[in-house]
């Protein structure tokens, strides 16, 4: 029996201070062998369709990326079977995707062909109302997240007054010496792939970092400091690796996508992250508080405390409204579930599995 393949869980999009923020175009590279864009309404089985296909190929020993949904972290927005260079993507709002190379690479699998339109028409007013209410809750949530980001900016500005540039530059240079200095330059253009390693979901902040930074990685953990400091270090290291021709995965902060959280260099199995879950097994922990001179803003301690209190409240309320949207979305799915021919969906899924197996045989 084949050894089971590995599973990596990431988020291709997120609920952020900028609204729904998508790195959907980063799920698979432009040289993909095949991209299946799955269309259909809520509850038609898109996520289960992808998950069942992923489980089939994991069972056969192939590594799979599961691209999780920020509106429901137990659902999928996408799936990549790496060896086959094949992706399946949810092609419905808010991450609508249309084929870029129809027929040659991309094709649409329309699960809407397997629903009873007459049943949906009977429930039309309920579907329209629920859809409207879901959009309203998300828009409201995004306003709260935008407020949280503004408060975060204020905290970063205050803490920024105490950044010792000389100490920060020394950390950057030491990391470059330790991680990049002895690396050979290769004759290729390094690529940067952008994703989220965590997301603001109905269940709060969710991450699957242990599936990204696995046990065979050398992990450096950046502890403390400010988001501007860790972002600067990660951006600096990205440039140093990239100029030598190496591909990088960059994972962004879920609230403010302009901030960085994690850097992965798969060629060397190296990770640099701010995620505190990695601290216990990090090869090195770098305390970024050492570059902050707190005496420079000790007169603003009260302002920082008030900012933190308001930040937590805004974030909590934003999450609460995303949770409301999820509850309404669950109700909306019921309208579609009752109208679906899931036997036909299963047959399409099995046919898709066989097609991917044929691609793997040709490799």
Image: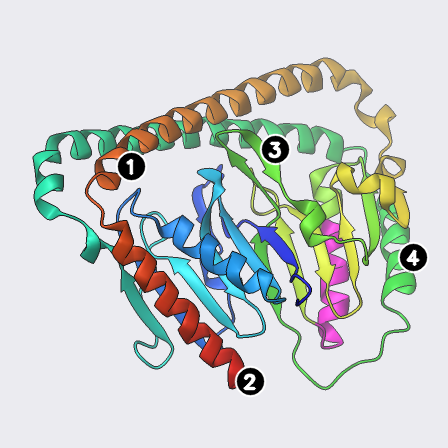
Q: Determine whether, in the image, residue 306 is placed left or right of residue 108.
A: right
Tell me the quadrant of the picture where the C terminus can be found. Answer: bottom right
The residue stretch that appears in magenta? 232-246
Q: Secondary structure at mark 4?
A: helix
Q: Is residue 133 magenta?
A: no
Disc nearer the start of the sequence (1/2) = 1
Point out the tag, 3 or 1, that comes first from the N-terminus. 3
- Examine the rendering and report whether any part of residue 36 can be seen: no
Task: Estimate the spatial distance between the alpha carbons at disc 3 and disc 4, rounded to whole Å.
Answer: 28 Å
Residue tagged 1: 333
Identify the residue under disc 2.
363
- Secondary structure found at label 2: loop
Which of pointers 2 and 4 lies earlier in the amino acid sequence? 4
Place residue 338 in its image quadrant: top left
The CA distance from mark 1 to mark 4 is 53 Å
Tell me the number on the disc at residue 83. Answer: none
**C-alpha span from label 2 to label 3:** 49 Å
Q: Within 10 Å of the Cα at label 1, are there few (<14), some (14-19), or many (20+) other Cα atoms?
A: some
Residue at the image position 61 percent from the left and 43 percent from the top? 253
Quadrant containing the N terminus is bottom right
Q: Are marks 2 and 4 in contact (CB under 8 Å)?
A: no
Residue 132 locus on image (x, y percent): 23, 32
The residue that disc 4 covers is 174
Percent of width and height locating residue 201: 50, 34
Q: In the rendering, at what x and y percent does residue 53 appear? A: 46, 60
Q: Position of residue 257 (x, y in %)?
A: 56, 46
Q: Residue 153 — which label? A: 3
> Mark 3 vs mark 4: which is more N-terminal?
3
For the residues marked 3 and 1, what is the alpha-carbon distance in whole angstroms? Answer: 38 Å
Instruction: Please say whether residue 7 is visible from this viewpoint.
Output: yes
């Amino acid at each position: 029996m084949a050894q089971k393949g590995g599973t990596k869980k990431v988020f291709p999009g997120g609920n952020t201070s900028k609204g729904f923020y998508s790195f959907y175009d980063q799920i698979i590279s432009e040289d993909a062998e095949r991209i299946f864009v799955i269309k259909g309404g809520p509850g038609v089985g898109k996520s289960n369709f992808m998950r069942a296909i992923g489980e089939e190929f994991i069972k056969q020993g192939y590594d799979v990326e599961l691209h999780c949904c920020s509106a429901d972290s137990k659902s999928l927005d996408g799936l990549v079977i790496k060896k086959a260079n094949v992706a399946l993507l949810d092609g419905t709002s808010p991450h609508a995707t249309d084929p870029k190379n129809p027929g040659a690479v991309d094709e649409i699998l329309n699960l809407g062909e397997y629903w009873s339109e007459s049943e949906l028409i009977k429930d039309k007013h309920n579907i329209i109302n629920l859809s409207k209410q879901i959009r309203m809750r998300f828009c409201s949530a995004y306003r709260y997240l935008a407020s949280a980001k503004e408060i975060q900016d204020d905290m970063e500005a205050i803490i920024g007054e105490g950044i010792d540039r000389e100490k920060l530059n020394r950390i950057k240079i030491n990391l470059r010496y330790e991680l990049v200095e002895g690396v050979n330059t290769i004759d290729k253009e390094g690529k940067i792939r952008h994703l989220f390693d965590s997301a603001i979901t109905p269940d709060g902040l969710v991450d699957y970092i242990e599936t990204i930074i696995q046990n065979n990685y050398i992990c450096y953990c950046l502890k403390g400091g400010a988001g501007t400091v860790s972002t600067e270090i990660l951006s600096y290291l990205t440039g140093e690796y990239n100029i030598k021709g190496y591909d990088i995965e960059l994972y962004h902060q879920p609230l403010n996508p302009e901030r960085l959280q994690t850097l992965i260099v798969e060629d060397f199995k190296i990770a640099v992250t701010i995620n505190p879950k990695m601290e216990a097994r990090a090869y090195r922990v770098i305390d970024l508080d050492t570059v902050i001179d707190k005496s420079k803003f000790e007169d603003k301690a009260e302002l920082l405390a008030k900012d933190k209190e308001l930040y937590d409240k805004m974030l909590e309320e934003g999450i609460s409204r995303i949770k409301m949207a999820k509850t309404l979305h669950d109700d909306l799915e019921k309208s579609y579930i009752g109208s679906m021919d899931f036997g036909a969906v299963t047959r399409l899924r099995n046919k898709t599995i066989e097609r991917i197996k044929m691609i793997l045989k040709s490799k």
